[in-house]
Amino acid sequence: MTHGDCFIYAHEHREEIIWMSQNTNQLPTDPRIEGAMLDAIRQKDYVFYPYNKGVFGLREALLADVNAPEEYEALITNGAIEALYALTRALLKPGDGVICTNPSFMPIHHQIRLCGAVPVELPIYAPPYKMTVEQAQEAIDARTKALLLIDPHNPMGSQYDKDEVKGLCDLAEDYRLWFIHDITYIDFAHTHTAAHDIIPERTIDVYSFSKNSAMAGMRIGGLMAPGAIMELVEPYNTNVLSANVIAQRAALASLETKKEWIGRMVGQARRNQAMIKEAVDDIPGLSLPVYPSGSNMFVMDLGDTGIDPDRLQEELLYEHNIFVRSGTYVSEEFGDRFVRISFTVPEEGIKMFVAALPEAVRKLSSSP
Ligand SMILES: Cc1ncc(COP(=O)(O)O)c(C=O)c1O
């Protein structure tokens, strides 16, 4: 089977597969979220277009969730990916440069290229496994228009501390750059510094309900920025009839209840990553460059085992029903050195993974 076939196979066998490949979250959140969706269906909310700025209360709840500055507004979108699409279209023109990283969540780089702009990818597959202020400063030139900070990072799991965020914000201020703060994994972070508290007039927060609220299939997210930036984005908002109403009702329920369950959910995610760490430490050649991860994933480096990550992905999927992601998806340059592992799955799945890993590694290390 080829790499592409993995997804068809995994979807066809979803009931049996331990899905650790897309940073989705299968841990329990709160029954009130599902309840809000069922209510929306029973009340036939889906017959109508929602209020075009989103169901009442959702934008306010989102702004409150991230403690956005008072002048910030929110746009509700079909996932963070749609927010990023509108945003890149609005802010970038051909020839502009955007400081970002490699590895990264590459679909954003694709969107940057669609604008004729250039993702200026700073190599981060070496300590400290994140963008440094020095690296960013060196890469800035007259064409640079924005800095994209995925924080915590996909796929590395690295987090940025206060001084690092401050340093990058200072650069954005000095060089008059937009600061795109992709906070998709914010709730998994051990610490988080909001760029919007440092340079509110230049920051755009990109938000997703896919991971923290375990709702990837609902396709709901948003962006938050000051009114002046929202005015720039508005003409590129293709979503003038608003996002899926059932997803919006679930998102609101999630924000209203999150404080009650997020700690439990993140606690399980942290226990899961610790179990994987223990297993990886026992296998010669393998390592976790970033541990603990501030996200719901990390990368597992294959060291000098000589294992091809695409083959490990296939071996785990087809022989053990475990779906991890080859590094080649998140980095052309470094992707042959690692696989990405998402650990927000029930503990049973982690146990299956740690049992299968040594066997898969042994088999692939010895096969030509
Ligand atoms: C950094 C980052 N931004 C955005 C997204 C897309 O999120 P959504 O599912 O809300 O479109 C992802 C998804 O994996 C991501 O990792």
Image (cartoon, rainbow, N blue to C red):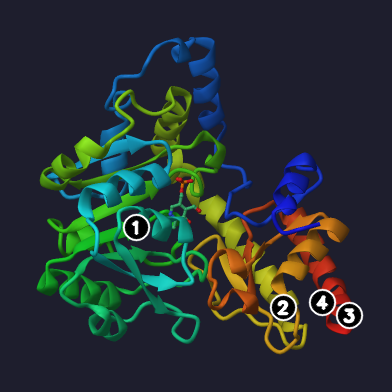
Residue under pointer 4? 361
Q: Secondary structure at mark 4?
A: helix
Which class describes the residues within 10 Å of circle 1: few (<14), some (14-19), or many (20+)?
A: many
Residue 42 rendering spot, x and y as whole percentages: 54, 11
Distance of mark 1 from mark 3, alpha carbons? 40 Å
Which image quadrant: the N terminus?
bottom right
Instruction: Name above or below for residue 13 compared with residue 268.
Output: above
Position of 280 with respect to 194 (left or right) is right
User: Nearer the observer, disc 2 or disc 3?
Assistant: 3
Residue under pointer 3? 367
Upstream in the sequence, badge 2 or badge 4? 2
The image quadrant of residue 300 is: bottom right
Label 4 CB-ligand 1 distance < 8 A: no
Mark seen at residue 285? none
Query: For the residue marked with disc 1, what is the amino acid?
Result: Ile
Residue 357 rendering spot, x and y as whole percentages: 80, 70
Upstream in the sequence, badge 1 or badge 4? 1
Residue under pointer 1? 112
The image quadrant of residue 45 is: top left
Residue under pointer 2? 280
